[in-house]
Image (cartoon, rainbow, N blue to C red):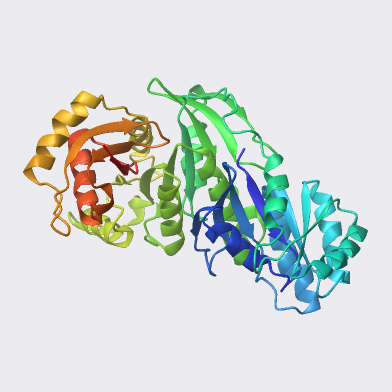
Amino acid sequence: MANIVAIVGRPNVGKSTFFNRLVEQRQAIMDDMPGVTRDRHYGYAQWTNKFFTVIDTGGYVTGSDDKFESAIRRQVELALEECSAVIFMVDCKDGLTGYDKEFAKVIRKSKKPVFVAANKVDTPAKAIEANEFYELNLGEVYPISAENGSGSGELLDELVKIFPEEGVEDPDAGIPKIAIVGRPNSGKSSLLNVLLGNERSIVTEEAGTTRDAIHSRYKMFGNDFILIDTAGIRKKSKVTEDIEFYSVLRSLRALEESDVCIVVIDAERGLESQDVNIIVLAQKQTKGIVVMINKWDLIEKDTKTADKFKKDIQEKLAPIDYLPILFASALTKQRIFQVMEKAVEVYRNKTKRIPTSELNDAMLPEIVHYPPPAIKGKHIQIKYITQVTARSPSFAFFCNLPQYIQESYQRFLENRLREKFGFEGVPIRLFFRKK
């Protein structure tokens, strides 16, 4: 199960400041993703080799009483439902308020592990004031300063202890996990229903933890894989903002658990910013990606329509240019199985190992033919290449001056690798090391 941490609390207690600290501080961060409608709600963080997604539930409220009831509460309840732990942020300057007590009730219902972060403790004297929050009866209180970072280490040390250990024996290890992600109404459910509707092909179906995405074990054309469904988002609420929030949450969780994701895009709406967010996040998390343009049956087309559509998508996704883009229709079942075959192929690309001799035989002549440009009169020589063990294809290039390899040259090497060995749909990582 994915490690997801929700930061909750009333407005202006410093949730976003702490969130930014978690996702931007170099020791703690991997990456962050701009939110859907407003800036930055989901980040990807790391602490002592444990990776987790952080959700900032801030900024949903302007402070009026009735809005606290509706907007913030709905968002928080959604976040509480999805997360594995809660950081409940309170403010030492304001002290314990009625809102905090209200919040504590909501949090208690979630039955999730809670860490009370008493923020704005900028001096040792202030730390004593944090003690009044024990009255909330939510366990240990951690005095912190989101602004300067003091106290956050102790809080994070305790937080990551509750995450399951890394590398748990996975009964489904080696079986591709394919997540179906995308915006609400793009046709994820229809795709899933077409795939699972054929009773002969489904082997077992088990619901994931709590309200998690459903995992279905699936066999097709002799391939065995696990489908992670992120559908069923719409019925949570009629409020668009909630739907957006919830769909991104679901997509995040499914993404983290998957090897390959099929990003379903509505042909009538084209590629939208939320689709780009999901693709960029998948790329940063080194997932395999297949883009499925759904509802293609509804588009009026001539011979050039698909090419034009594809080109438009590639421009919007640049520099990510290695993704397979398939035009399909869940409704008419057109090319649905090609999409699944492509997802399995991308999984194979992701797990492919190239023997060192083959790698050097293919790449060294290319490097000799087009060597790295000299920098400050120094000639860079790449002597040897090997594939290193990692979550996605990663290659180490051993050379005399690794620090001088330009980005444009890295791009050249990546393109040659793709040309020679495939790797469609998969991010490639290159490392340059001193021989």
- Residue 282 is left or right of residue 345, and the answer is right
Between 179 and 358, the residue placed more toward the observer is 358
Quarter holding residue 131: bottom right
Quadrant position of the C terminus in the picture:
top left
Residue 84 seen in the figure: no
Between 245 and 189, the residue placed more toward the observer is 245
Q: Position of residue 76 (x, y in %)?
A: 72, 60
Q: Position of residue 244 (x, y in %)?
A: 57, 61
- Residue 85 is left or right of residue 359, and the answer is right
Identity of the residue furthest to the right in this view: 135
Q: Position of residue 289 (x, y in %)?
A: 38, 44
Q: Position of residue 51 (x, y in %)?
A: 57, 44
Quadrant position of the N terminus in the picture:
top right
Identity of the residue furthest to the left in this view: 369
Q: Is residue 387 above or below residue 7?
A: above
Residue 191 seen in the figure: yes
The residue lying at 83 percent from left, 75 percent from top is 94
Identity of the residue furthest to the top in this view: 222
Quarter holding residue 342: top left
Q: How many marks?
A: 0
- Residue 67 is left or right of residue 417, and the answer is right
Between 356 and 252, the residue placed more toward the observer is 356
Q: Is residue 115 above or below residue 17?
A: above
Q: Is residue 381 above or below residue 357?
A: below
The residue lying at 15 percent from left, 49 percent from top is 372
The residue lying at 50 percent from left, 34 percent from top is 227
